[in-house]
Amino acid sequence: MASVDVPVALLGYGTVGAAVNRLLTDSADDIERATGHRIRLVKALVRDPRKERDYPPPGGVLTTDFSEIANDPSIQVVAEVMGGVDPAGGYVLDLLRGGKHVVTANKQLVARRGAELFEAASEGGVQLRFEASVCAAIPVIKVLRESLVVSNVHRVLGIVNGTTNFVLTEMEAGKTYDEALAEAQRRGFAEADPSDDVNGADAAAKMAILATVAFNSRVGLEDVDYSGITAIDPLDIAAADQLDMVIRLVGAARLVDGQFDVRVQAALVDKQHPLAKVNGAFNAVMLQGDAIREITLEGPGAGGIETASAVIADMASVIGTMGTGFLQNDAAWRELPRLPSGDSTSPFYFRLSVEDRPGALARVADELAQREISIARLLQHQNGSGAALHVVTHEARVGALDDALVALGALPEVHAASRPMPVVSDRGVAELGWA
Ligand SMILES: NC(=O)c1ccc[n+]([C@@H]2O[C@H](COP(=O)([O-])OP(=O)(O)OC[C@H]3O[C@@H](n4cnc5c(N)ncnc54)[C@H](OP(=O)(O)O)[C@@H]3O)[C@@H](O)[C@H]2O)c1
């Protein structure tokens, strides 16, 4: 097979950019044998070309002048691996409008500005691929967009943030939140400023992208209800263990009667559920749909080389399908409404600190029953002069549960109520026709 020389450029040459060049260089022969193309890095945009770098590129590759990439007609494929929304967004728009294919690892950019980016790609007649923006090495976007194009995926459950999963796993082993986060930073699983990871924003951006591709309707970051793990304390971990569960930061995207519902929250996950077995910095995404029942993908969700492997796979896919087919289209071809937040349903867990006197339990059950919330499991143990009640409900509306917790908080017998957490126990197998 005759080999085709393909000059490519990078926006950014940091952790991911340098790893892309390293992989392109070390695996050049393998890539050529597999694809028939010799992918060669010719330009990389950086802020400071004099900076000392891990895997320095050949002389002349680094530039601070974006026009050297945008105006070079020999460069048809560019990978954006610089991060941030500005100026990365403007650069990507220029490249797409100028007829260059773009591959990006930038989840915040795709989640915040997806609509205009895909419009620009369609104007330019080029592809915008973004595999590396969600779960790095796990090929979930390609599976959703290409392999599952006719499978009507209606539920996506994921552990899509490695930092928080590592912290929660360490807390299970006995560490406090602060100790676990410090360990994550020491081992390179958390940034010096881990805010976006621990507050759920990073996972929310990934779930917005996954929901958009799964449901073919634009889901922006503003459409995702999210919270993080900063309020989880060892008491929550111990309570989960007593119920044979673990705590995970779970992203859940569902289609409910033609409306989408996307949220990221710390959840109690049954130890028998596949997501409970995802430990350390690993990620997993579970896809459920009419034609596929259930597919779970699991693997490393971050890291320079892992992310670079997805960037290069996207480049190879672009090169192999340039100018042809549906991949130039925006995955979001319809507009579905968002499910009102209070109408979202799930089984929930919460904890109450109550006075240990006759009738207290009956009052609690009565407040819940008045809002059509039924109790699936109840654990009670002595807590000083009072009692701690651990309540797991059957499927309940978020709005009804919020009301119930306000009413419970006003009861004289109830001293305190914990924040409710969704419970992930069943896999919806009956609904998928397995029961
Ligand atoms: N690292 C991971 O594990 C991982 C995983 C998945 C996705 N991602 C995503 O991949 C992207 C890159 O991450 P990274 O870890 O490689 O970041 P990084 O190490 O901070 O590298 C960023 C690169 O972009 C360049 N850059 C930044 N702003 C620039 C500007 N205004 N003009 C010109 N160049 C600019 C920097 O130039 P200088 O070198 O001169 O400073 C640097 O080379 C981000 O979107 C990130 O979310 C990363």
Image (cartoon, rainbow, N blue to C red):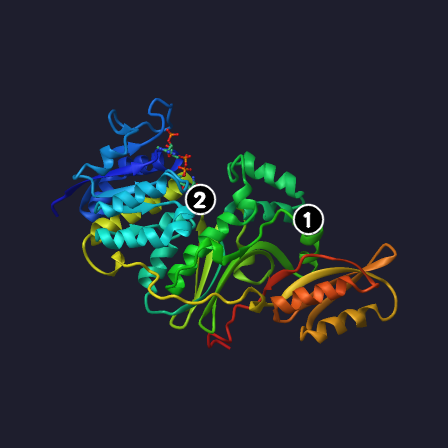
Residue 237 at x, y = what percent? 67, 52
Question: Where residue 194 sits: x, y (%)?
Answer: 54, 40
**Which residue is found at the position 49% from the left and 53% from the top?**
204
Residue lying farthest to the left in this orientation: 2
Whether residue 137 is visible here, answered yes or no, is no
The residue that appears at 62% across and 41% down in the rendered structure is 180
On screen, residue 414 versus residue 173, left or right, reads right
Q: Is mark 1 within 8 Å of ligand 1?
A: no
Asked if the residues shown at circle 2 and circle 1 are in contact, with their CB atoms under 8 angstroms apart, the answer is: no
**Ligand 1 falls in quadrant:** top left
Q: Secondary structure at mark 1?
A: loop
Secondary structure state at the residue bearing disc 2: loop
* Residue at x-position 38% and y-position 72%: 291
Residue 190 in percent (x, y) is at 53, 39
| Callout count | 2
Query: Closest to the observer: 195 or 392?
Result: 195
Q: Which of the two discs, 2 and 1, labels the residue nearer the N terminus?
A: 1
Q: Is mark 2 within 8 Å of ligand 1?
A: yes
Residue 327 or 25: which is nearer the viewer? 327
> Gap in Å between the C-alphas at discs 2 and 1?
26 Å
Query: Mark 2 — residue?
Result: 302
Which of the two residues, 138 or 106, is positioned nearer the viewer here?
A: 106
Q: Which residue is mark 1?
A: 233
Q: Name the kind of residue labelled 1 in the image.
A: Asp
**Residue 36: image tag:** none
Residue 58, x across and y down, in percent: 26, 27
